[in-house]
Image (cartoon, rainbow, N blue to C red):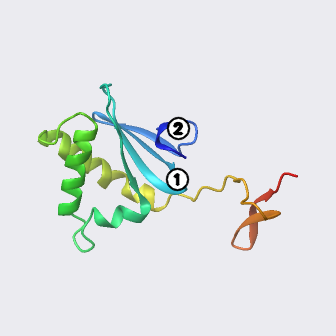
Amino acid sequence: MTASSLVLGGPDALRVYRKGQFGVALQHVNDEESICIWPLRKQPGAGAFIVGLRSLHQYFDAHTARPTRYAFLSCMQALDVMKIGATDRHALHQLLDVLYEYAPDLVVMPPDLRPRELPAGLESAEIIVDGKVEARVEAKN
């Protein structure tokens, strides 16, 4: 999936929220559970901030659950990408609040079990969870 084909909060999103000036979606991006955050106010050229489950640990201290320096710097960069501006302290704290509030939902988000096309040479594939076949894909002949 390329960035140009990603629909934030679309039909593939597990959940979609509004939090202050941000839209928030829990959805799979490049086969990874992710929090997608975008500005609700339309700006030409504005982008989104996407945090995958594999990198979530970098945003909060393991002992205190407080935002890390990395979280502040990443959120400041994200505000620039969203055309809000890194110097907007209210937006910065609001963005950190979004991450803090929805991080637990991201941690328990189920994996994407939709069948995919098989790589060349494979005839079939299964996704098995707790001994039960959840999805099966057959190669097209």
Residue 51 vs 2, above or below: the answer is below
Q: Amino acid at mark 1?
A: Asn
Whether residue 73 sits left or right of residue 139 in the image: it is: left
Q: Quadrant of residue 41?
A: top left
- Identify the residue at image location x=31%, y=32%: 46
Whether residue 17 sits left or right of residue 119 in the image: it is: left
- Identify the residue at image location x=83%, y=63%: 123
- Kindly identify which numbered label has been placed on residue 5: 2
- Distance of label 1 from label 2 (alpha carbons): 11 Å
Percent position of residue 93, x then y: 18, 46
Q: Quick check: can you spot residue 9?
A: no
Residue 30 vs 129, above or below: the answer is above
Q: Amino acid at mark 2?
A: Ser
Percent position of residue 98, x then y: 30, 47
How many labels sit on residues?
A: 2
- Kindly identify which numbered label has been placed on residue 80: none
Percent position of residue 102, x then y: 37, 52
Q: Quadrant of residue 81?
A: top left
| Observer-nearest of 102 and 127 | 127
**Pointer 1 and pointer 2: residues touching (CB < 8 Å)?**
no
Q: Quick check: can you spot residue 139?
A: yes
| Observer-nearest of 31 and 40 | 31
Q: Secondary structure at mark 1?
A: loop
Q: What is the residue that sits farthest to the right in this orientation? A: 141
Give the crowd class for mark 2: few <14, some 14-19, many >=20 residues within 10 Å.
few
- Identify the residue at image location x=75%, y=60%: 120
Percent position of residue 105, x then y: 44, 55
Residue 135 vs 57, above or below: the answer is above
- Kindly identify which numbered label has been placed on residue 30: 1
| Observer-nearest of 139 and 97 | 139
